[in-house]
Image (cartoon, helix red, strand yellow):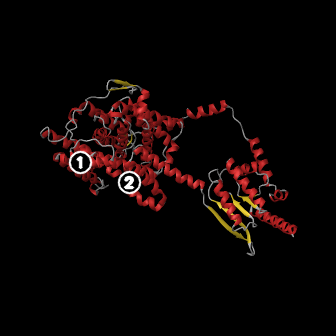
Amino acid sequence: MTEKKLASLGKAEEGKSGKLTMNQNSNTRSVSDIVQARARKFFSKKTLHQRLPITQWLPKYNLESLEGDMVAGLTVGLTVIPQGIAYALVAGLTPNYGLYSAFMGCFVYMFLGSCKDITIGPTAIMSIMTHEYSVDKNPDYAILLCFLSGIIIFAAAVCNLGFLITFISKPVIAGFTSAAAISIASSQLKGLFGLSYQSESVIEAFSKLFENIGDTRWQDLTLGLCSIVVLLLMRKLKDLKITKVQPDDSTYVRIGRKMLFLISVGRNAIVVIVAGIIAFAAKSDTFTLTGDIEAGLPAFKAPPFSTWDNGTEIYFSEMVSNVGAGIIIIPLISILESIAIASAFAGGKTIDATQEMYALGMCNILGAFVQSIPVTGSFSRTAVNSTSGVKTPAGGIVTGLLVVLALAFLTPYFKYIPKATLSAVIICAVIFMVEYETVRPIWKARQLDQIPLWGTFLTCLFWKLEFGILVGVGINLAILLYGVARPKVNVSTVLRKDESGPHYVLVEPRSGLFFPSVDHIRGQVTKAGVGPAESSVMVVVDCKHFTGIDYTATKGMKSLCQDFERRHQPLVFTNVTPGVERGLCSLIDDIVIARSSDQIDAAYKICQHLQLLNSISKE
C-alpha cells in the first residue's frame, strides 16, 4: 500500500487540497440578491422584446411590410376556410368548429409569435387526435382539450421544459407524421365514395370501404376524383417558371404572374367554391352535401367544465378522466408540430422554443373561449404564407379577419359544399405529409435509426397514434441508454521507445463514467489487464471522455483498483478532470493519477522496480 502511494506521486493529496481551496473561494449569495437579480432580468428591455416579439418589429413596420402581409394574409385566409371546414369533419364535429378554430390563433400569435411565417389554426393531425379523444363526438370535450392543452403548454414554457422535445428524434416524428397522414387519408375515402360508415383504424377503413363499395355514389366519386386532379394540377402551377416574377417584366406581366401564383396557392378555396356552385345548380340529392352550418360568430365564453350526456351531467373530473392520455398527448404533438415548423422556416435563425410554447399555449387558452378545438402550426399554410411574401406576423390579422367575415356572412352558403370535395381537399393536403423521401437519408446517416422510424410508423398505423409516439421514444431511449451503458472501449498497446516490449496497455473508454456503464468499463479494463497486459504490464486508463462521476461508478473503480492490487499489477489513471478526480479520491486512497506522459513514465519505472523486488523476494 505504501509503495502505491509513492507511485501516485502525491497527486491524490493535491486533488483533495484543490477541492478544499475551490470551496473556500466560492461566493455565496443571499436569497434577496438572487431574487433581485431575477427581478432585474425579468423586467429588462431584453426580456420585453423576447417575451413580446411584436415590440421588435412593430416600430420598423412600413408600407412594404403592409403590402406583403395583406397579400399573404388573404392567401392564407382563402386556404384556411375550406381546410377548417374539412378538418372539423375529421375531428368528428360540425364544420363551424373548424372555422371557430381558425382565427383566434392568428390574432394571438401576432403579439407573441417569434416566427413571421407560422400560421396557427386547425391541422389534420390535431383534428384526428381530437377525434380520438372527443368522447361521443361531443364538442365540449374538444373545447376542454383545447383549454387544458393551452394550460399545459404554457406551464411547460414557464418551467423551461422545452428541452424535453429534443428526446423525440426526427425519425420518430417522420414515422408519426407519415402514419397520421395515411390514417387521415383513409378516413376520407368514405366521403370521396359517397358512403357512410364508422371506422377507427386504417385496416377497418379499407375493410368497410370494400364491404360498402357497392353503395358508391358515382356522382360523389366523379366530383371527388375531378377535385383531386384539379387540386394537384393547380398545386404544381406555382412551381412553374411562368409564375416567377422576373426583374424585366412589365407591370401587366408581373400582375399576371402574381395572379397565376395566387390561383395556385388559393386552389382549395377555388375548387370548393366551384364545387359548391355545381352542387347548388344540381338537384338537391345529386351530391352528399355538408348540410346546415351554424351561422354567426361564436360567443366569447369560458370553456365548458361540465357537459351533459343523455340527460346526465358530467363534471370536470369525470371529463378529464374520459379524455385520459389526450391531456398529455395532444399538447405534446402540438408543441412538436409547431416547433418543427418554426425550425423549418427559421431561415438559419435560432428558434426560441420557450417563446413558441408561450405563444402556442396562449393561442389554445384564448381559442377555447371562442369554442376552438386544439390548434398548432400548420405546415401547408405556413408554406403558403412564406411563399406569398409575408413580412411579419401581422399577416395573421388579415387571415383572422377573413375567417371572421366568412363566419358572419357566408355560413348559409357553406351547406352546399359537397363532402366529396372536402375529402379531396383533405387527401391532397395530407398525402404530401408522407415522408417517404427521408427513408434513404436516414439509412445512409445511421441504419439503426430505421428501428424507431418503422417502429413508430407501424404502431401508429396499425394500433394508435399516441402509442406510436411512445413506442418510438421508448426505442430511441433504449438505443441511447444502451450506448451509455455499453460505451465503446479502445484498447491499444504502447511500446517502449526501443520497441523491445510493451511499455503499457492504454484503455480508452469513449463515453462518460456513470453508474449504467461502470460494470462494462470495469470489465473491459480487467479484460485488458489479464489479456494484452498479461496480468503484469502496467494498464493506463485514459479518462479524457469522462465528464463526471457518480457514487456507484466510484465504488466500481475502487473495486477495480483492488483487483489490480491483488494481482500486483499497476493501474494508472490519466487525463482526469478535476471533478472526476475529486470523486475518485473521495473513496480511493491509493489511486494513481498521472497528469502527463512524464508522470506515466515515472509510474512505469516505479512499477518495474516494485516488480523486480517482488521477483527477488519470491526467489
- Answer left or right for 174 relative to 40: left
Asked if residue 443 can be seen in this view, the reply is yes
Residue 455 spot, x, y in % from top left: 43, 53
> In the image, is residue 320 above or below residue 564?
above
**Which element carries disc 1, helix, strand or loop?**
helix
- Answer left or right for 134 relative to 549: left
Task: Mark 1 or mark 2: name the one nearer the start of the chain.
Answer: 1
- Camera-side residue of 479 and 544: 479
User: Label 1, on which residue?
Assistant: 211
User: Marks 1 and 2, Cα distance to the nearest angstrom?
Assistant: 30 Å
Mark identifier at residue 183: none
Residue 411 spot, x, y in % from top left: 24, 33
The quadrant of the rendering that contains the C terminus is bottom right
Disc 1 residue type? Glu
Q: Nearer the viewer, mark 1 or mark 2?
A: 1
Q: Residues within 10 Å of mark 1 (few under 14, many from 20)?
A: few
Residue 555 spot, x, y in % from top left: 71, 50
Asked if residue 595 can be seen in this view, the reply is no
> In the image, is residue 598 above or below residue 391?
below
- Camera-side residue of 441 and 216: 216
**Which element carries disc 2, helix, strand or loop?**
loop
Mark identifier at residue 435: 2
